[in-house]
């Protein structure tokens, strides 16, 4: 099965970030959101698989721990920011773009059209 257009869009965004963005922006785009999504997903799925008695192998049992560790990797490269600072607004835009693309991609996997995400007040005010 070929990837959906939304999957290609999401992967392209992250590929471009890895190739051209400064390291701190890569950490925000790739580590914080991507590993956070993976951590949330596996944290929700693992108990269900366990209840269904289909949890098998070490992969499932250590995955959320590994994602949590990956989530924090590189944070030393991102500077401390305030929401209204120039760098803070940049990080917010990167996270907003990433979250929107993930939302569209995951919705496409189940054949649903993604409804627009609601912007946080801080991000909307900065736009």
Image (spheres, helix red, strand yellow):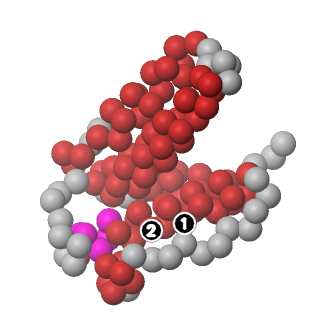
Residue under the image location 23 percent in, 73 percent down? 83
The extreme top residue here reads 57
69 magenta-colored: no
Residue located farthest toward the right when viewing the structure as drawn = 1
Q: Residue at x 62, y 19 (%)?
A: 55
Q: Quadrant of the C terminus?
A: bottom left
Q: What residue would you read off at disc 1?
A: 100
Please say whether residue 9 is visible from this viewpoint.
Answer: no
Q: Are marks 1 and 2 in contact (CB under 8 Å)?
A: yes
Tell me where the magenta segment starts and ends, as one range.
Answer: 87-91
Across and down, in percent, residue 126 comes to: 32, 84
Numbered-mark total: 2
What crowding class fits label 2: few (fewer than 14 Cα within 10 Å), some (14-19), or many (20 or more)? some
The percent position of residue 68, horizontal first and vertical second, equals 36, 35
Q: List x then y, in percent, for residue 31.
A: 38, 46
Tell me which corner region of the image, top left, top right, bottom left or bottom right, holds residue 4. Answer: bottom right
Numbered tag placed on residue 96 in the rendering: 2
> Is residue 41 or residue 8 the one in the foreground?
41
Q: Is residue 87 above or below residue 56?
A: below
Q: Residue 112: horizontal and vertical position, in percent?
A: 76, 62
């Amino acid at each position: 099965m070929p990837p959906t257009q939304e999957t290609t869009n999401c992967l392209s965004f992250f590929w471009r970030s890895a190739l051209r963005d400064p390291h701190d922006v890569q950490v925000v785009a790739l580590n914080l959101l991507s590993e956070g999504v993976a951590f949330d997903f596996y944290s929700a799925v693992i108990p269900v698989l366990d209840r269904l008695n289909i949890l098998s192998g070490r992969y499932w049992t250590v995955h959320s721990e590994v994602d949590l560790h990956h989530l924090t990797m590189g944070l030393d490269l991102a500077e401390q920011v305030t929401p209204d600072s120039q760098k803070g607004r940049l990080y917010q835009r990167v996270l907003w773009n990433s979250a929107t693309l993930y939302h569209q991609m995951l919705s496409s996997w189940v054949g649903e059209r993604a409804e627009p995400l609601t912007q946080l007040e801080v991000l909307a005010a900065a736009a």
